[in-house]
Image: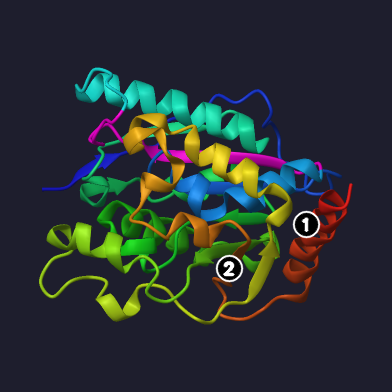
Amino acid sequence: MKSTIHVPALSHPQVGVVAYHRPVTRLLAFIPHPDDESYSFGGTIALAARRGWECHVICVSSGEKGKRHDGGPAGREAVGATREAELRRSCSILGAKPPAFLHMPDGAVRTVELGPSAIAGLLDRFAAEIVVTLGSDGAYGHPDHLAVHRWVSAAWSARPASRGGALLYPVFPRGLFLPQWEKCRHMLGEPPDPPAEAVGSDSFHYEVDIRAVRETKLASIAAHRSQLPGGDPEAIFPPGIVSSLLDKERFHDATGQRSPGTADLLASLSAGAEHLRHT
């Protein structure tokens, strides 16, 4: 059974009336759970913040059903509160503004029916030049990831083209997340959605060199201590995954084609990264 939730007005001191000719570039990330910002596009957020962009994160669920590895209380309320605090810490490390939370049910986001203008209203409120959210494979197929992807994509496609901006999805190497997909297999239905062959891709529209902020990205992952066995940031996923995500972040454009304007914006981050690596 689905429930309807209308996204509440978000209180954020840094976001006011939209100014389409403002000098500051904005990036807006929609994430399903705390920690999805760090491994997916944490490097890009960190570079953007260092370049003076205003970076915002909207977290759909507090991740209250996550298994705890730090010895703290395991009740859902306690886990949710801890994970929200960890996301705040991660955003601070990356240079993003304090995150906003929508408090939808962890593990059941797909059962929620949003008011028709909910996500569109947030897009208009933040008026970001770059919006990022997980792609159609949800990284590894988690149903909450897929639900958020569908909501944001539908709201974006319904916007007038005159609003401008770009919606980007992170692209992970084909098969990289298959071990995590296997762990989530019981949640993906029969046949599984997405199928194994749809996890990851070898094609992408944009690539951002994040080597200058690899330690920042790793620290952002480490901020989610409650989810890390032994406190090891590389233990968030099966072996070999995190180490593959620390040099480059790749993106697919929601339009299905590369935009010169978006490419230039992202290239400015890589150019800044090159400067940072040599200073």
Q: Quadrant of residue 137?
A: bottom left
Residue 269: mark in rendering: 1
Residue 230: x percent and y percent?
A: 35, 34
Decide which of 251, 103 is in the foreground and name it.
251
Q: Please report whichever mark, 2 or 1, sits nearer to the chain's N-terminal start.
A: 2
Residue 276: x percent and y percent?
A: 83, 49
Q: Residues within 10 Å of mark 1 (few under 14, many from 20)?
A: many
* Amino acid marked by disc 2: Phe
Against 212, residue 229 (above or below) is above
Decide which of 25, 272 is in the foreground and name it.
272
Magenta run includes residue 57 = yes
Q: Is residue 173 visible?
A: yes
Residue 251: mark in rendering: 2
Magenta run includes residue 127 = no
Highlighted range, magenta: 52-69
Residue 216: x percent and y percent?
A: 64, 41
* Amino acid marked by disc 1: Leu
Against 191, residue 272 (above or below) is above
Residue 215: x percent and y percent?
A: 63, 44
